[in-house]
């Protein structure tokens, strides 16, 4: 067998080798281009054409969850169509931009929700999906494609049917979300008395403005849309200490938070001297680090023999009826702090 000698090749052999190397480089460049520019949401089910644009610049969306949604969207579209629906043939499934919302909770749970319109099928659906590094954070119905509310349907009534409308006794997703409690309010649910009636979200707090905060909290923590439920507000305070405040002595002002164990994991507390024997403690609930607190509660602590006592239950703004033995100038200073 003749020995290959790279230094004694003919011009034609050099051209063949050079052409082969060039062809290989072209192939590598083309493959790399296709990989880097491929659609992050492969063509499974019914592809939502503008989802990539709506999620750009936000927390990384889970491709796995998107694939689940696209397949579920195809299944539901087929269920509500008299003809066979082929996912790859549907080119006009569009997420309604004004309905798109992405929530990134501090605990690592990410939730996306939007309406999707399919003009070729004359159908609209409500879509939500979740992802988290810790799978225990995912809600049972956090990833769901379902029928829209009548006012959200962009087309004529197509008598939409989904898993919730076909199965009897299937629990409403609110049962997996509530109760939610903190120092500001308590959120609970009540099942409807009649079939087809809306579920009720019970909001218990200290005053009327807490209703708005409660609704914001529900949107921030879950994929639940409060507009789908009946809201019932009760001004009854949810957090009444089961101890006699004027006689319950704590060793440090920060011990206030320990008197409300249900809020201990929701709030940070900081205390500072105010006037004479009074110390002001602020309980802050944060949306994210380095931002303004989502909610602030004030508590006034008075130094007594052997420690400190709480002058009244925590409030956003301290009131005289709740702190009857505190001078008005001290309350004013606390509320201005």
Image (cartoon, rainbow, N blue to C red):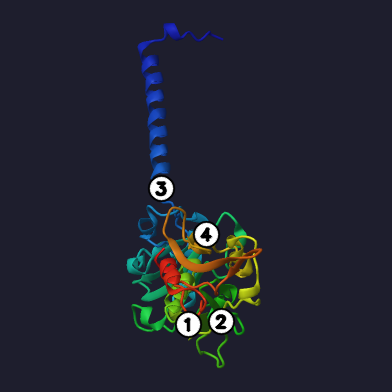
Question: Quick one: 222 or 203, which is closer to the camera?
Answer: 203
Number of numbered labels in the structure image: 4
Q: Which mark is residue 271?
A: 4
Left or right of 323? Residue 12 is left
Query: What percent of the width, then of the height, locates residue 45?
Result: 47, 63
Query: What residue do we see at 55% from left, 75% from top?
Result: 173
Query: What percent of the width, then of the height, locates residue 285?
Result: 50, 63
Query: What residue do we see at 41% from left, 19% from top?
Result: 17
Mark 2 or mark 1, earlier in chain: 2
Question: What's the distance in space between the residues labelled 1 and 3, CA to CA?
Answer: 41 Å
Instruction: State the residue position of label 3.
Output: 38
Mark 2 or 3: the one toward you: 2
Question: Could you tell me if the residues under marks 2 and 3 are in contact, i.e. CB atoms within 8 Å?
Answer: no
Left or right of 303? Residue 218 is left
Q: Give the secondary structure at mark 3.
A: loop
Q: Callout 3: 10 Å neighbours few (<14), some, many (20+)?
A: few
Is residue 295 something that shows in the picture? yes
Q: Callout 2: 10 Å neighbours few (<14), some, many (20+)?
A: many
Query: What residue do we see at 41% from left, 63% from top?
Result: 337
Mark 2 or mark 3, earlier in chain: 3
Question: What's the distance in space between the residues labelled 2 and 3, CA to CA?
Answer: 45 Å
Instruction: State the residue position of label 2.
Output: 189
Q: Give the secondary structure at mark 4.
A: strand
Question: Could you tell me if the residues under marks 2 and 1 are in contact, i.e. CB atoms within 8 Å?
Answer: yes
Q: Which mark is residue 229?
A: 1
Mark 2 or 4: the one toward you: 4
């Amino acid at each position: 067998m003749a020995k290959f000698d790279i230094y004694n090749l003919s011009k034609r052999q050099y051209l063949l080798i050079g052409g082969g190397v060039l062809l290989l480089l072209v192939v590598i460049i083309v493959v790399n281009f296709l990989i880097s520019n491929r659609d992050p949401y492969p063509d499974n089910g019914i592809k939502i054409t503008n989802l990539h644009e709506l999620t750009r610049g936000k927390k990384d969306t889970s491709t796995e969850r998107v694939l689940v949604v696209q397949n579920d969207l195809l299944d539901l579209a087929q269920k509500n169509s008299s003809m066979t629906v082929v996912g790859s043939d549907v080119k006009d499934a569009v997420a309604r931009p004004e309905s798109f919302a992405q929530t990134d909770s501090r605990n690592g749970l990410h939730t996306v929700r939007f309406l999707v319109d399919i003009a070729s099928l004359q159908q609209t659906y409500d879509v939500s999906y979740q992802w988290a590094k810790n799978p225990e954070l995912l809600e049972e119905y956090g990833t769901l494609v379902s029928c829209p509310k009548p006012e959200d349907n962009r087309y004529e009534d197509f008598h939409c049917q989904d898993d919730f409308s076909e199965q009897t006794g299937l629990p409403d997703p609110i049962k997996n979300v509530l109760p939610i409690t903190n120092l500001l309010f308590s959120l609970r649910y009540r099942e409807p008395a009649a079939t087809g009636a809306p579920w009720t979200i019970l909001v218990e707090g200290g005053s009327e403005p807490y209703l708005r905060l409660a609704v914001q909290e529900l949107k921030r923590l879950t994929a639940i849309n409060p507009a789908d439920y009946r809201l019932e507000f009760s001004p009854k305070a949810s957090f009444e200490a089961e101890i006699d405040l004027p006689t319950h002595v704590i060793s440090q002002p920060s011990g206030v938070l320990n008197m409300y164990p249900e809020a201990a994991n929701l709030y940070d507390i900081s205390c500072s001297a105010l006037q004479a024997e009074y110390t002001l403690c602020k309980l802050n609930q944060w949306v994210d680090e380095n931002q303004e607190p989502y909610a602030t509660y004030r508590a006034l602590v008075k130094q007594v023999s052997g420690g400190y006592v709480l002058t009244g239950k925590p409030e956003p703004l301290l009131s005289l009826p709740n702190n009857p033995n505190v001078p008005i100038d001290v309350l004013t200073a606390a509320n201005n702090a």
